[in-house]
Amino acid sequence: MSDKIGLFTGSFDPITNGHVDLIERASRLFDRLYVGIFYNPHKEGFFNIHAKKRIVLAALAHLENVEVITSHDELAVDVAKRLGVTALVRGLRNGQDLDYEASLHFFNKELAPDLETVFLLSQPAYQYISSSRMRELIAFQQDLSAYVPASVIEELEKKDE
């Protein structure tokens, strides 16, 4: 029997406790889970790709079957094919996320018919936490420690130095 390999992608700018929860839950469903930090041309980045990778690696260090990768100028389905991924993993917080993800799912199926998509519902405690809200709180110098892993706070402190 072949390994079950998942790919959870995002811009993770910054990664939130909601992302970490989804990744922890997904890691229990797959033999191997790739977490792909992808460049999103529709989102303005706060952290550069190197900082994001440091932050995500630190936040997920406790997960033995998780590997963090980065990608730029590639579709998730192309990365998935290259890595032998059997399923894309996506998180859903609300109906807006579902609409957005349904559109992605349509095109992913067109491009890679054999690739499944697994949707995980956000825990209620994380339903309203998003990277864009975290960037807004950062801009107003608010405490994020309840919403993000410690590695985000540490990276923000480095930026302030």
Image: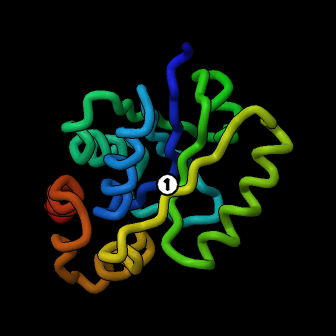
Say which of 152 and 21 sits in front: 21
Q: Residues within 10 Å of mark 1 (few under 14, many from 20)?
A: many
Q: Tell me where residue 32 sits by quadrant.
A: top left
Q: Residue at x 19, y 53 (%)?
A: 151
Residue 145 falls in which quadrant of the image? bottom left
Residue under numbered circle 1: 11
> Is 143 in front, or is 65?
65
User: Would you say 105 lies left or right of 12 here?
Assistant: right
Left or right of 9, for residue 74: right
Residue at image location 64% in from the left, 64% down from the top: 42
Spot occupied by residue 44 in the image (x, y as percentages of width and height)? 53, 66
Residue lying at 30% horizontally and 81% vertically, measured from the top left:
137
Drawn side of residue 145 relative to residue 108, left or right? left
Q: Is residue 75 visible?
A: yes
Rendered-image quadrant of the C terminus: bottom left
Relative to 62, is 1 above or below? above
Is the image coloured rainbow, by chain, by secondary structure, or in one colour? rainbow
Looking at the picture, how far across and down is residue 31, in whole percent? 42, 26
Instruction: Give the residue type that dot 1 points to.
Output: Ser
In the structure shown, which secondary structural element does the residue marked by tag 1 occupy? loop
Q: Quadrant of the N terminus?
A: top right
